[in-house]
Image (cartoon, rainbow, N blue to C red):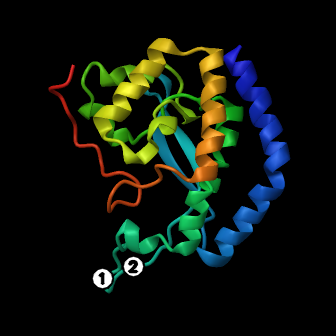
Amino acid sequence: MKRAIDFILSLILIVLLFPVIIVTAIFIKSFIGNPIIFKQTRPGKNAEPFNVYKFRTMTNERDSKGELLSDVKRLNSSGKLIRKLSLDELPQLFNVLKGDLSLVGPRPLLMEYLPLYNSKQKRRHEVKPGITGWAQVNGRNAISWNEKFELDIWYVENQSIWLDFKILILTVKKVFISEGISNGNHVTIEKFKGNKEIH
């Protein structure tokens, strides 16, 4: 049932939001540059890799040595606006349509984090990752990694259609109040370095 709901809702949202998707793409090309779409390999259910799609929010600015500047320096006002409105997440609706993602589930993190998880943290991969999740409506990037993983595991153990519906409603609310987008001095959240002692 969840897959059917994901497919139908993502298709409806793509159709309804198609003008927004086109305008956002034009905006990015004009004020941030190419490529418009950012693609990255992330672990899905059972840690199987897939390509996740997002609208690009950072420029390609480089220093005198040709190396990319820090994320903070490459995130201009246009990129900040796109993140504030969560427009960068819209291409992931196509991931949901394909079946890589669910609308609701633990957010897909980086492949490099997989060896760093302890046995409990690995449980977040027992379900399909999502565009939004229980951790996102309870702090997003403004909470610690340990808190985020605890919320992810709670979702894995308590998932239901009604919980997903609640999370979707709360997500819409979070987007409108732009809460929990950043963490301290970081553009999003600092990298996970592992926490093997937590079980």
Residue at 39% x, 42% y is 110
Look at the image and tell me whether residue 102 can be seen.
no
The quarter holding residue 94 reads top right
In the drawing, does residue 100 fall left or right of residue 112?
right
Q: Label 2 sits on what residue type? A: Arg
- Residue 1 rendering spot, x and y as whole percentages: 71, 13
Helix, strand or loop at label 2? It is: loop
Residue at 69% x, 41% y is 93
Does 75 appear above or below 135?
below
Rate crowding at label 2 as few (under 14), some (14 to 19) or many (20 or more) other CA atoms within 10 Å: few
Give the Cα distance between marks 1 and 2: 8 Å
Residue at 29% x, 19% y is 120
- Residue 131 rendering spot, x and y as whole percentages: 58, 38
Look at the image and tell me whether residue 31 can be seen.
yes
In the drawing, does residue 41 fall left or right of residue 183?
right
Which residue, given by chain and number where applicable, does mark 2 sit on? 62
Q: Nearer the viewer, residue 169 or 115?
A: 169
Q: Nearer the viewer, residue 21 or 61?
A: 21
The quarter holding residue 97 reads top right
Q: Nearer the viewer, residue 144 or 104?
A: 144
Does 183 appear above or below 15?
below
Helix, strand or loop at label 1? It is: loop
The quarter holding residue 20 reads bottom right
Q: Are marks 1 and 2 in contact (CB under 8 Å)?
A: yes
Residue at 46% x, 39% y is 42
Observer-side mark, 1 or 2, equals 2
Q: Residue furthest bottom?
A: 64
Q: Quadrant of the C terminus?
A: top left
Which residue, given by chain and number where applicable, does mark 1 sit on? 65
